[in-house]
Image: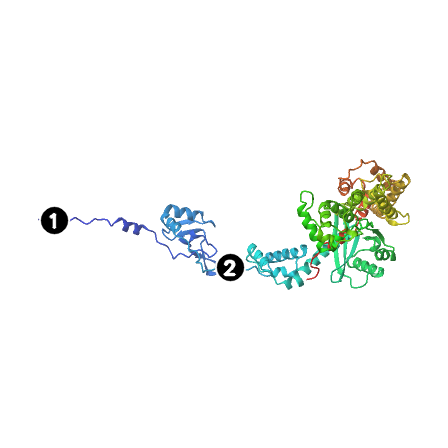
Amino acid sequence: MNEEKVPEPRHPPIEMCLQQQRPKAKEPLKPPPRSLKADVLKHFGFYCQPGPGNKKALNMMYAVCRHCYGKVKYFGNTTNARVHMDRHHPELLKEEMGRPTKAPTAGQRTLHHFERFPKHSEQAKKITRAIAVIIVKDLHPYSTVEREGFRHLVHTLEPCYRIPHRVTFSNTVIPQLYKETKLKVREGLIKANRVVLTCDHWTSRTTESYGTFTVHYITDEWELQSLVLQTRAMHESHTAANVNETFHSVAEEWGLTLSDCVIVTDNAANMLAAMQLNDLTHVTCFALLGRIRRIVRYFHRSAVAAEALKASQKECIPLVVNVLYCLIIDISTRWNSAHDMVERFLEQLPAGSAALVSPEVRRNNTADSSALNDAEIHCAEEIVETLKPFKEATKAVSEARTPTLSIIAPMHHHLLQSTEMDKEDSPLVWDAKCAMHDDLTKRYNSAKTKSKHLLHMASGLDPRFKALPFLAEEERSDVHARLITEAATLDVKLTYLLIHIFITYLCEQYIYVENYVRAPPKSPRTRAEEEMKKYLEEPPLSLEVHPLDWWKLKERDFRLLAKLAKRILCIPGTSVAAERVFSTAGDIVID
């Protein structure tokens, strides 16, 4: 049986038809420019077209698909290309999305590990400057940049930054930071109405002497600025002439005029003599007074007694307020230290008494360091109450953010009242009050001293004390008259200059100025008197209000008095600002 042959189809297979229908490129496609880095563009190319100078250039109006040679409008983005691939070649997109990216092996380092900030890049300079600020602000030695922990911290925060050598900081970075800061400080000093200097000297354990100078002034925004100008070695002896020469050297370096400066120092004899050489305006430190008798220092002299005190403190925990606190030795030039010494002694009295009667202490103890009896303890309690106003006065005049010169006169009056003798006082309290009252009476109480007038003027310009209740009526009138004179003097030159410029301008504009000449503006003296009258009519402020905040709000109402307030209220009543530089034991002075 013969099989019937199936006739061959007349038409070719579908696959062949599709291949025949697939369009062909007119010419070879050129790859996209290197600047186009989108992944989808690797499926597209561009035709060439004639360019200038018989050169060929890419026709960027259309992107041509490499798979179907379909043209896609190209506008500089990949939106149309992605739509084309998603609609006509979705299998290619799915294949690429499922393909894992090649990650670097464990031993292969990425480019990030090799990148370092250039030495002079802005980011590197910014970090280097920040490290310099840490060294300066926190008094760190230059060797900090070489310590392993610090380098690890910086590398963790910014791996691309390389810390410069310590010599770079000591020779370049910090000196440059000092120059920039010094320039800013000098600009502020030039703008200030008045500048006040404070000075203090200190000797290290290696007998090296240093002197520090601080400056104080009020800005245009009524902010009190207190800055450390410099700390220098004092190799010469501290005679009055040398101290005076040092002040002139500092003033010259910082562009100051000592004749217009106020200098605040302690009550040392060489300081007082140095200020008298050039008749400089000088205010002695109000916080460095008092010669209070020292109490027994036995627990600081004897190691056995000190150990016994610690043991007694542990046993008397329910009775002692400050457990394991050391007894305080007073300093003869600090009012608050005498108060703190007696107060701490009374707090530690149970433990101290127990330590003094212990066998190991009594064996080497003397009658001078024996325990106090009840009468002596009562006297000590009275002494603490007597010294409490001096403690508060010391804290008040040592406040750095508030003008302190204005509170000295009322504080001085208050302390004189608190040291007035009472018939009920014990003989010890009577003697203590007499000594302190006599010393306070001599201090700032001489009619010949400039400081007395300066103190009263400062209090008069402080809205809290402007009524001057601590002065007699005649003295009050004298202070107000001085303020009026000073305020008028500050503005007289400027006023006449403005009048002259104003009239000259009108004449140049051919304006009739007879009325202006006949009725000139009020004189500075008249304006100052009117401002003083209006100022005294203002309601008094409470002690909690900052006087500079008040002047900032009222500056436009009292233009003359405001200028004078800036010149006087910037003066501190104590040289504590200079002493704070040397108040931390163990600080590195030179690295």
Q: Secondary structure at mark 2?
A: helix
Residue 87 x/y as whole percent:
38, 45
Instruction: Give the residue drawn at x 65%, y 61%.
Output: 142
Camera-nearest residue between 347 and 263: 347
Dot placed on the residue nearer the N-terminal end, 1 or 2: 1
Q: Callout 2, which amino acid?
A: His
Asked if residue 504 lies left or right of residue 26, the reply is right
Position of 236 relative to 541 (above/below): below
| Colour style of the rendered protein structure | rainbow
Quarter-of-image position of residue 182: bottom right
Determine contact: label 1, label 2, CB under 8 Å.
no
Name the residue carrying label 1: 3
Camera-nearest residue between 392 and 356: 356
Quarter-of-image position of residue 49: bottom left
Residue 269 x/y as whole percent:
85, 56
Name the residue carrying label 2: 113
Asked if residue 101 lies left or right of residue 455, the reply is left
Q: Secondary structure at mark 1?
A: loop
Sort mark 1 into few (<14), some (14-19) or many (20+) by Cα contacts within 10 Å. few
Position of 538 relative to 28 (above/below): above
Instruction: Give the residue drawn at x 39%, y 46%.
Output: 86
Q: Is residue 535 visible?
A: yes
Q: Callout 1, which amino acid?
A: Glu
Sort mark 2 into few (<14), some (14-19) or many (20+) by Cα contacts within 10 Å. few
Residue 53 x/y as whole percent:
48, 61
